[in-house]
Image (cartoon, rainbow, N blue to C red):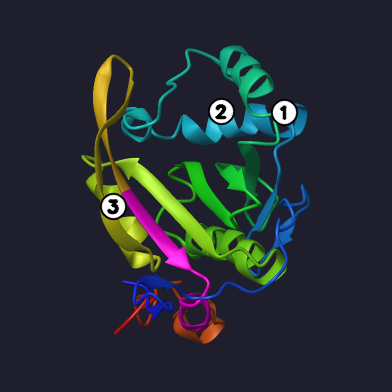
Amino acid sequence: MSGHNTNDLGQPIGLPVTGDFPRPTPPYTPMEGRYCSVVPLDVNRHAPRLFRAFANDTDGNNWTYLPYGPFDGEREFEDWTRETCMDSDPMFHTVLDSNETPVGMASFLRIDPAAGAIEVGHIHFSPLLQRSPQSTETMFLMMRRVFDELGYRRYEWKCDALNAPSCRAAERLGFTFEGIFRQATHYKGRNRDTAWYSILDSEWPRIRSAFEDWLSPDNFDQTGQQRQPLKARASV
Protein backbone atom coordinates (compact mmCIF):
# COMPACT_ATOMS: atom_id res chain seq x y z
CA MET A 1 0.00 0.00 0.00
CA SER A 2 1.20 3.52 -0.73
CA GLY A 3 2.56 5.59 2.14
CA HIS A 4 0.81 8.62 3.56
CA ASN A 5 1.26 11.79 5.56
CA THR A 6 -0.82 13.13 8.43
CA ASN A 7 -2.53 16.51 8.39
CA ASP A 8 -2.96 18.96 11.27
CA LEU A 9 -6.18 17.17 12.27
CA GLY A 10 -4.39 13.87 12.70
CA GLN A 11 -5.97 12.40 9.58
CA PRO A 12 -3.96 10.28 7.13
CA ILE A 13 -3.62 11.97 3.74
CA GLY A 14 -1.90 10.99 0.52
CA LEU A 15 1.69 11.84 -0.28
CA PRO A 16 2.35 14.98 -2.35
CA VAL A 17 2.26 14.59 -6.14
CA THR A 18 4.71 16.61 -8.19
CA GLY A 19 4.92 17.28 -11.91
CA ASP A 20 2.72 18.97 -14.45
CA PHE A 21 -0.73 17.67 -15.34
CA PRO A 22 -2.28 16.76 -17.64
CA ARG A 23 0.53 14.60 -18.96
CA PRO A 24 0.98 14.39 -22.74
CA THR A 25 -1.18 12.03 -24.74
CA PRO A 26 0.76 9.21 -26.42
CA PRO A 27 2.14 10.19 -29.82
CA TYR A 28 1.12 8.01 -32.73
CA THR A 29 4.70 7.28 -33.72
CA PRO A 30 6.79 4.10 -34.01
CA MET A 31 8.53 2.48 -31.04
CA GLU A 32 11.73 0.82 -32.22
CA GLY A 33 13.41 -2.06 -30.45
CA ARG A 34 16.23 -4.52 -31.00
CA TYR A 35 14.01 -7.43 -32.01
CA CYS A 36 10.82 -5.76 -33.24
CA SER A 37 9.01 -2.48 -33.70
CA VAL A 38 5.59 -1.31 -32.55
CA VAL A 39 4.03 1.05 -35.08
CA PRO A 40 0.68 2.79 -35.66
CA LEU A 41 -1.77 0.34 -37.20
CA ASP A 42 -2.15 0.92 -40.94
CA VAL A 43 -5.21 -0.92 -42.24
CA ASN A 44 -4.11 -1.12 -45.85
CA ARG A 45 -0.56 -2.25 -45.10
CA HIS A 46 -1.12 -4.37 -42.01
CA ALA A 47 -4.60 -5.87 -41.93
CA PRO A 48 -4.16 -8.54 -44.65
CA ARG A 49 -0.92 -9.84 -43.17
CA LEU A 50 -2.24 -9.63 -39.61
CA PHE A 51 -5.18 -11.78 -40.66
CA ARG A 52 -2.80 -14.35 -42.13
CA ALA A 53 -0.63 -14.26 -39.00
CA PHE A 54 -3.65 -14.79 -36.75
CA ALA A 55 -4.76 -17.67 -39.00
CA ASN A 56 -1.80 -19.67 -37.64
CA ASP A 57 -3.94 -20.04 -34.52
CA THR A 58 -5.86 -22.87 -36.19
CA ASP A 59 -8.13 -23.73 -33.25
CA GLY A 60 -9.05 -20.09 -32.49
CA ASN A 61 -7.70 -20.28 -28.95
CA ASN A 62 -6.39 -16.71 -29.06
CA TRP A 63 -9.85 -15.26 -29.70
CA THR A 64 -11.57 -16.78 -26.65
CA TYR A 65 -11.04 -13.89 -24.25
CA LEU A 66 -11.21 -11.05 -26.78
CA PRO A 67 -14.59 -9.30 -27.13
CA TYR A 68 -14.50 -9.73 -30.93
CA GLY A 69 -13.51 -12.36 -33.47
CA PRO A 70 -12.71 -14.77 -34.88
CA PHE A 71 -13.35 -13.41 -38.36
CA ASP A 72 -14.53 -15.48 -41.30
CA GLY A 73 -12.26 -13.87 -43.85
CA GLU A 74 -9.68 -11.23 -44.62
CA ARG A 75 -12.27 -8.70 -45.82
CA GLU A 76 -14.30 -9.02 -42.62
CA PHE A 77 -11.20 -8.52 -40.52
CA GLU A 78 -10.10 -5.55 -42.60
CA ASP A 79 -13.54 -3.94 -42.25
CA TRP A 80 -13.37 -4.47 -38.49
CA THR A 81 -9.95 -2.85 -38.18
CA ARG A 82 -11.11 0.10 -40.27
CA GLU A 83 -14.23 0.61 -38.14
CA THR A 84 -12.71 -0.13 -34.73
CA CYS A 85 -8.97 0.53 -34.68
CA MET A 86 -8.61 4.05 -36.08
CA ASP A 87 -9.59 6.08 -33.01
CA SER A 88 -7.20 7.74 -30.58
CA ASP A 89 -8.53 5.69 -27.66
CA PRO A 90 -8.03 2.78 -27.96
CA MET A 91 -4.85 3.63 -29.84
CA PHE A 92 -4.04 0.47 -31.81
CA HIS A 93 -0.53 -0.53 -32.83
CA THR A 94 0.87 -3.30 -34.99
CA VAL A 95 3.88 -5.36 -33.92
CA LEU A 96 6.38 -5.88 -36.75
CA ASP A 97 9.07 -8.54 -36.55
CA SER A 98 12.64 -7.96 -37.69
CA ASN A 99 11.50 -8.47 -41.30
CA GLU A 100 8.76 -5.85 -40.85
CA THR A 101 6.08 -8.54 -41.05
CA PRO A 102 2.94 -7.81 -38.97
CA VAL A 103 2.69 -10.49 -36.28
CA GLY A 104 0.47 -8.98 -33.57
CA MET A 105 -1.51 -6.08 -32.17
CA ALA A 106 -1.70 -4.10 -28.92
CA SER A 107 -3.17 -0.79 -27.87
CA PHE A 108 -3.10 2.00 -25.34
CA LEU A 109 -6.58 2.66 -23.94
CA ARG A 110 -8.41 4.38 -21.10
CA ILE A 111 -5.86 7.14 -21.63
CA ASP A 112 -6.19 9.62 -18.74
CA PRO A 113 -3.60 12.41 -19.02
CA ALA A 114 -5.16 14.32 -16.11
CA ALA A 115 -4.52 11.43 -13.74
CA GLY A 116 -1.37 10.22 -15.48
CA ALA A 117 -2.86 6.74 -15.92
CA ILE A 118 -3.11 4.53 -18.98
CA GLU A 119 -3.97 0.91 -19.79
CA VAL A 120 -2.48 -1.60 -22.20
CA GLY A 121 -5.01 -3.87 -23.85
CA HIS A 122 -6.41 -5.52 -26.98
CA ILE A 123 -3.24 -7.60 -26.90
CA HIS A 124 -3.41 -10.19 -29.65
CA PHE A 125 -0.13 -11.92 -30.41
CA SER A 126 -0.18 -14.44 -33.23
CA PRO A 127 1.63 -17.79 -32.85
CA LEU A 128 4.46 -16.19 -34.83
CA LEU A 129 5.01 -13.76 -31.94
CA GLN A 130 4.09 -15.71 -28.83
CA ARG A 131 6.82 -16.87 -26.44
CA SER A 132 9.50 -14.90 -28.25
CA PRO A 133 11.86 -12.05 -27.38
CA GLN A 134 9.74 -9.88 -29.67
CA SER A 135 6.61 -10.37 -27.56
CA THR A 136 8.39 -9.34 -24.37
CA GLU A 137 10.11 -6.42 -26.09
CA THR A 138 6.73 -5.20 -27.38
CA MET A 139 5.51 -4.81 -23.82
CA PHE A 140 8.79 -3.16 -22.78
CA LEU A 141 8.62 -0.62 -25.59
CA MET A 142 5.07 0.35 -24.64
CA MET A 143 5.99 0.65 -20.96
CA ARG A 144 9.02 2.76 -21.83
CA ARG A 145 6.85 5.16 -23.78
CA VAL A 146 4.38 5.48 -20.91
CA PHE A 147 6.90 6.05 -18.14
CA ASP A 148 10.06 7.43 -19.73
CA GLU A 149 8.63 9.48 -22.57
CA LEU A 150 5.28 10.61 -21.14
CA GLY A 151 5.87 10.55 -17.38
CA TYR A 152 2.70 8.70 -16.44
CA ARG A 153 2.18 7.57 -12.84
CA ARG A 154 0.25 4.35 -13.44
CA TYR A 155 0.14 1.63 -16.11
CA GLU A 156 -2.75 -0.83 -16.02
CA TRP A 157 -3.42 -4.35 -17.28
CA LYS A 158 -6.91 -5.83 -17.09
CA CYS A 159 -8.17 -9.20 -18.25
CA ASP A 160 -10.90 -11.77 -17.74
CA ALA A 161 -10.14 -13.25 -14.33
CA LEU A 162 -10.58 -16.72 -15.90
CA ASN A 163 -7.87 -16.02 -18.49
CA ALA A 164 -5.02 -17.74 -16.65
CA PRO A 165 -2.38 -17.16 -19.39
CA SER A 166 -3.06 -13.40 -19.35
CA CYS A 167 -2.85 -13.30 -15.54
CA ARG A 168 0.47 -15.15 -15.63
CA ALA A 169 1.77 -12.83 -18.34
CA ALA A 170 0.90 -9.74 -16.29
CA GLU A 171 2.79 -11.06 -13.29
CA ARG A 172 5.79 -12.12 -15.38
CA LEU A 173 5.96 -8.60 -16.85
CA GLY A 174 6.08 -6.97 -13.42
CA PHE A 175 2.45 -5.99 -12.87
CA THR A 176 1.04 -6.21 -9.34
CA PHE A 177 -2.34 -7.88 -8.84
CA GLU A 178 -4.86 -5.47 -7.30
CA GLY A 179 -8.03 -7.52 -7.13
CA ILE A 180 -11.06 -8.72 -9.08
CA PHE A 181 -14.00 -6.54 -10.10
CA ARG A 182 -16.95 -8.92 -10.04
CA GLN A 183 -19.39 -8.77 -12.98
CA ALA A 184 -17.42 -5.84 -14.35
CA THR A 185 -18.75 -6.34 -17.86
CA HIS A 186 -20.00 -8.95 -20.32
CA TYR A 187 -18.98 -10.02 -23.81
CA LYS A 188 -19.89 -12.72 -26.29
CA GLY A 189 -22.99 -13.41 -24.23
CA ARG A 190 -21.12 -14.27 -21.03
CA ASN A 191 -20.08 -12.61 -17.79
CA ARG A 192 -16.63 -11.22 -17.16
CA ASP A 193 -15.09 -10.75 -13.75
CA THR A 194 -12.10 -8.51 -14.41
CA ALA A 195 -8.68 -8.97 -12.82
CA TRP A 196 -6.80 -5.68 -12.32
CA TYR A 197 -3.02 -5.27 -12.38
CA SER A 198 -0.77 -2.22 -12.35
CA ILE A 199 2.77 -0.88 -12.45
CA LEU A 200 3.55 2.43 -10.73
CA ASP A 201 6.17 4.97 -11.75
CA SER A 202 8.07 4.31 -8.51
CA GLU A 203 8.39 0.64 -9.50
CA TRP A 204 9.41 1.29 -13.08
CA PRO A 205 13.19 1.82 -12.66
CA ARG A 206 13.63 -1.66 -11.18
CA ILE A 207 11.32 -3.25 -13.75
CA ARG A 208 13.03 -1.41 -16.62
CA SER A 209 16.42 -2.70 -15.48
CA ALA A 210 15.06 -6.27 -15.39
CA PHE A 211 13.74 -5.94 -18.94
CA GLU A 212 17.03 -4.50 -20.20
CA ASP A 213 18.96 -7.40 -18.66
CA TRP A 214 16.57 -9.97 -20.12
CA LEU A 215 16.54 -8.42 -23.59
CA SER A 216 20.33 -8.26 -23.80
CA PRO A 217 21.73 -10.46 -26.61
CA ASP A 218 23.94 -12.09 -23.96
CA ASN A 219 20.81 -13.58 -22.38
CA PHE A 220 20.10 -15.78 -25.39
CA ASP A 221 22.03 -18.82 -26.59
CA GLN A 222 22.78 -19.73 -30.21
CA THR A 223 19.32 -21.29 -30.61
CA GLY A 224 17.58 -18.17 -29.28
CA GLN A 225 16.66 -19.71 -25.92
CA GLN A 226 16.81 -17.52 -22.84
CA ARG A 227 19.60 -18.16 -20.36
CA GLN A 228 17.84 -16.47 -17.43
CA PRO A 229 14.09 -15.83 -16.98
CA LEU A 230 12.64 -12.35 -16.78
CA LYS A 231 12.56 -11.13 -13.18
CA ALA A 232 10.46 -8.00 -13.48
CA ARG A 233 8.75 -8.15 -10.12
CA ALA A 234 7.76 -4.78 -8.68
CA SER A 235 9.29 -5.73 -5.32
CA VAL A 236 11.44 -8.47 -3.91
Q: Is residue 55 above or below residue 131?
A: above
Percent position of residue 82, x then y: 69, 21
Labels 2 and 3: the sequence-earlier one: 2
Q: Which residue is mark 3?
A: 167
Question: Which residue in the structure is indicated by mark 1?
Answer: 43
Residue 28: horizontal and vertical position, in percent?
A: 77, 47
Q: Amino acid at mark 2?
A: Phe
Give the residue type that dot 3 points to.
Cys
The quarter holding residue 6 reads: bottom left
Q: Is residue 132 magenta?
A: no
Label 2: how many residues lie within 10 Å, few (<14), some (14-19) or many (20+)? Answer: many
Report if the CB atoms under discs 2 and 3 are less than 8 Å apart.
no
Q: Residue at x 29, y 57 (%)?
A: 178
Q: Quadrant of the rendered structure where residue 57 is?
A: top left
Q: Amino acid at mark 1?
A: Val
Query: Which residue position is annotated with label 2?
Result: 51
The reply to whether residue 200 is in sight is yes
- First in sequence: mark 1 vs mark 2: 1
Measuring from the top left, give residue 107's x and y in whole percent.
Answer: 58, 43
Image quarter where the C terminus lies is: bottom left
Residue 138 horizontal/vertical position (percent): 56, 58
Crowd tier of the residue under label 1, counting other residues whose Cα lies within 10 Å: few below 14, some 14–19, many 20 or above: some
Q: Residue at x 38, y 46 (%)?
A: 158
- Helix, strand or loop for disc 3: helix
Q: Nearer the viewer, residue 28 or 74?
A: 28
Residue 233 relative to residue 83: left or right: left
Residue stretch in magenta:
196-210
Marks 1 and 2, how far apart in space?
Answer: 11 Å
Distance between the alpha carbons at the discs numbered 2 and 3: 25 Å
In the image, 133 versus 38, the foreground residue is 38
Q: Nearer the viewer, residue 25 or 103?
A: 25
Q: Is residue 35 visible?
A: no
